[in-house]
Amino acid sequence: MAETIELPAAEDTLDFGRRLGETLRAGDLVLLAGPLGAGKTVVAKGIAAGLGVQGRVSSPTFIIAREHKAGDRGIPLVHVDAYRLGGDLTELDDLDLDTELVEAVVVVEWGEGAAERLSDDHLLIRLDRRPDDTRVATLEPHGSWTHRPIG
């Protein structure tokens, strides 16, 4: 069942991601969908903060995937931007993300329609930005996520 959360400011979007990151565990797959400027990378930064991973988180657009080493919680983050893949699933396969899903949290921006096949257990977060700059996050849990508390 989908849940909708309003995020009035960028800080709220970051905090939502942080709270979610604190609940994530190795093997989790989170897909971020929405138009440019909706807050996908801000949520990813929050997730990284909640996981306590090392390194600065930014959009991995030009390198497609960036791995952040584990911090105190011992869980690394793989941050993927599937936008440039343009639906080319062979390139997604080349990233070997199914292997990463064993020991890391994998967050895929622009992953809807392609990355779901990595795992039946995933959380899809659709982000939208209203004219007043309020972000709206619609959370769609799949598989085991339907039985888990989210953020």
Image (cartoon, helix red, strand yellow):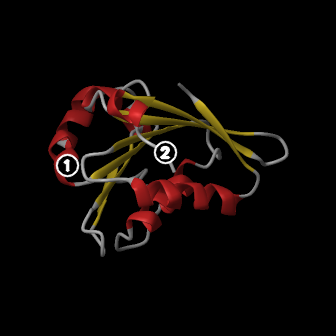
Type of residue at label 1?
Answer: Glu
Residue 133 spot, x, y in % from top left: 79, 48
Q: Is residue 105 visible?
A: yes
Residue 77 spot, x, y in % from top left: 32, 58
In this rendering, the answer to whether 36 lies above or below 14 is above
Q: Which residue is mark 2?
A: 150
- Dot 2 alpha-carbon crowd within 10 angstroms: few under 14, some 14 to 19, many 20 or more: some
Cα gap from disc 2 to disc 1, whole angstroms: 22 Å
* Residue 141: quadrant of the picture: top left
26 and 78: which is toward the camera = 26
**Disc number placed over residue 17 in the picture, else none:** none
Q: Which residue is mark 1?
A: 100
55 and 140: which is toward the camera = 140
Residue 20 spot, x, y in % from top left: 48, 53
Q: Is residue 59 visible?
A: no
**Which residue occupies 46% across, 37% down?**
110
Type of residue at label 2?
Answer: Ile
**Which residue occupies 55% across, 48% down?**
40
Which mark sits nearer the N-terminus, 2 or 1? 1
* Residue 34: quadrant of the picture: top right
**Which residue occupies 40% across, 34% down?**
147
Residue 61 spot, x, y in % from top left: 43, 50
Specify whether 27 is left or right of 60.
left
Q: How many marks?
A: 2
**Which residue occupies 27% across, 62% down?**
76
* Furthest residue in direction left, as rendered: 99
From the viewer's perspective, is the residue at label 2 or at label 1 nearer? 2
In this rendering, the answer to whether 17 lies above or below 99 is below
Q: Are marks 2 and 1 in contact (CB under 8 Å)?
A: no
126 and 64: which is toward the camera = 126
* Furthest residue in direction right, as rendered: 132
